[in-house]
Image (cartoon, rainbow, N blue to C red):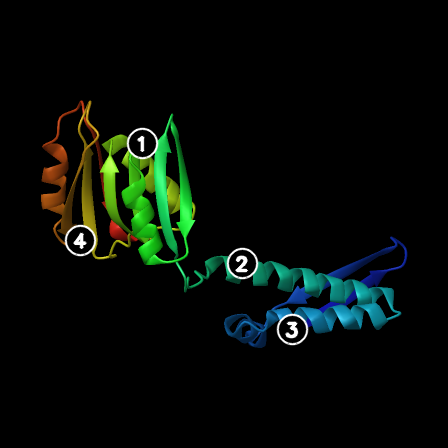
Amino acid sequence: MEISSTANSQAGTTFIEVVANEGDQELAANGALDDEIKKLSETANKTESFESKAAIDATIQFLVEKNNTNKEKEIPAKKEWGIFMYFYNEGKCDYMKSSSLKEGQALYRQRQEDAATIFVANGEMTRTKGDQVAIECCQGKALMDGNLRAKVYPDENIYVVNHENNSIYNDVTKFNKDKMDEAQKEFAKYSDDDSTIMVRGKDA
């Protein structure tokens, strides 16, 4: 990290310039920015020079922003997904968590009064019963809660997705990305009354 400061006594201002170098990129890649920020904070608290403190504070702000950006790009591995039963009643989906697979399966079998019930184990929806729309609502909630694994779509594929008018069903057709002409033909065959999209795997 290169830091420079230029004081203008007449204007009463100090210009601070912070320039990142290759070493900073390595720190970011190795996840060591937290330690670097802590060291700089300690140095800033000890210095008596206003210009030096301002320069260090500017550096800390730069590193904090870079550190947060890098952390946003990371997708942490989830070791324990857990056992959940989601149930839908009166326009609302709720859930119960079980401590074991056996306990969760027994609870799922006991629930009979719900409009819909889904059983989620290890991030996968393994059983469902009840109204299809209510099932999809609970599936969406489980996904938003972080208890259901999100689908991954390979970059080399193109998908044509059609939602039939007045229906709860979606038709998904997969093509290799070098088959764009075929994907466009598939897209064009659906009725104007339907909702149809074409998505690249890398954009999904």
Mark earlier in primary sequence (3, 4): 3
Which residue lies under the disc numbered 1? 113
Q: Does the CB distance between marks 2 and 1 fall below 8 Å?
A: no
Cα separation, mark 3 vs mark 2, equals 16 Å
Cα separation, mark 3 vs mark 1, equals 54 Å
Side (left or right) of 168 relative to 182 = right
Side (left or right) of 40 relative to 11 = left
**Residue 44 coordinates in the image, percent (x, y):** 80, 68
Q: Does the CB distance between marks 2 and 4 fall below 8 Å?
A: no
167, 138: nearer the viewer? 138
Q: Nearer the viewer, mark 3 or mark 2?
A: 3
The label shown at residue 177 is 4
Q: Amino acid at mark 1?
A: Glu
- Element class at badge 2: helix
- Element class at badge 4: loop
- Please tell me how crowded label 2 is: few (under 14), some (14-19), or many (20+) other residues with Cα within 10 Å: few
The label shown at residue 69 is 2
